[in-house]
Amino acid sequence: IADKRTPYCFRPVYIVCKGDNGHYQRPVDSLDKDLSNVDLCLKSSALSRIRSGCQLLQCLLPELLYAEQLVDNGDHFGSAITPASFRCLSPEIVTVDFSADEVRQMQPAMLWARLAQELAKKFPGDLQSVKWLAFLSCSRYTRPANHSRRPRSHAELLSCSPGHVNLGAGNLALCGTCGLHFWPTELSGWQTALGSSDSLPADMMDLSASQAGTLGASLSADLGA
């Protein structure tokens, strides 16, 4: 994942709240039928999924920048980073000094500020050259009271998913993990996953704007966020 040709990089971190076990959400009736995978919501599994997602972005970002003419066929980008040298550090676990309940009650802007302060303390050397991608392990989706349908608006979706935040500014991007269970653990699994028309379990969030209820559509939206 890492490339030492440039000091500029992204650092993915998996945020575990004080007093929490750091497990992310998985469906009650999991799509994974292999009983040996019953621990898929553990922190180690989260790191594998985040790593594969970052590897995919590491492949796609230079092409997207080039397509938008923000870089010129390998020339440097703002004298800071080239597509060939875009690098992402290996994901790691960071435990923060506030609880999951506090996170779920905070407004996104306040959560961003609190987390930025914590990361700046833990990684003081990152401030000049690193962008943080922070994944919140405590994100949870709960179906609406009317179980026969999914949320019909973005506002309703957010009201059903405390702790699920997608917000980026400055050197920090916050990402919820309500869809992390469906991220492949290996880069090679993304092509199949993104093309999947399998239905999402009713107790898991559909992140797609179309509310198509399919794994591929939700994954595409989750990755794009």
Image: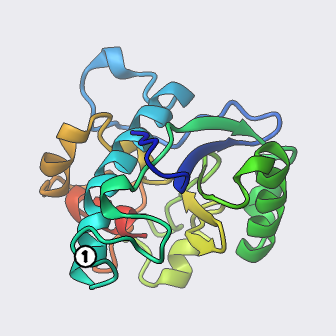
Please report the residue visible at 43 percent of the width from the left and 47 percent of the height from the top.
5
Say if 2 sits above or below 9 in the image.
Answer: above
Please report the residue visible at 50 percent of the width from the left and 42 percent of the height from the top.
89
Looking at the rendered image, the quarter that the C terminus falls into is bottom left
**Would you say 201 lies left or right of 140 here?**
left
Q: How is the image coloured?
A: rainbow
The residue tagged 1 is: 66
Displayed quadrant of residue 161: bottom right
Please report the residue visible at 54 percent of the width from the left and 41 percent of the height from the top.
24
- Using the image as rendered, state which of residue 163 and residue 10 is in the foreground: 10
- Using the image as rendered, state which of residue 38 and residue 76 is in the foreground: 76
Q: Look at the image and tell me whether residue 101 can be seen.
A: no
Q: Look at the image and tell me whether residue 199 can be seen.
A: yes
Image spot of residue 147 (x, y percent): 43, 64
Image spot of residue 133 (x, y percent): 56, 56
Looking at the rendered image, the quarter that the N terminus falls into is top left
Image spot of residue 95 (x, y percent): 76, 37
Image spot of residue 86 (x, y percent): 39, 56
Please report the residue visible at 33 percent of the width from the left and 46 percent of the height from the top.
55
Q: Amino acid at mark 1?
A: Tyr
**Would you say 163 lies left or right of 84 here?**
right
Element carrying mark 1 = helix
- Using the image as rendered, state which of residue 145 and residue 6 is in the foreground: 6
- Using the image as rendered, state which of residue 69 and residue 122 is in the foreground: 69
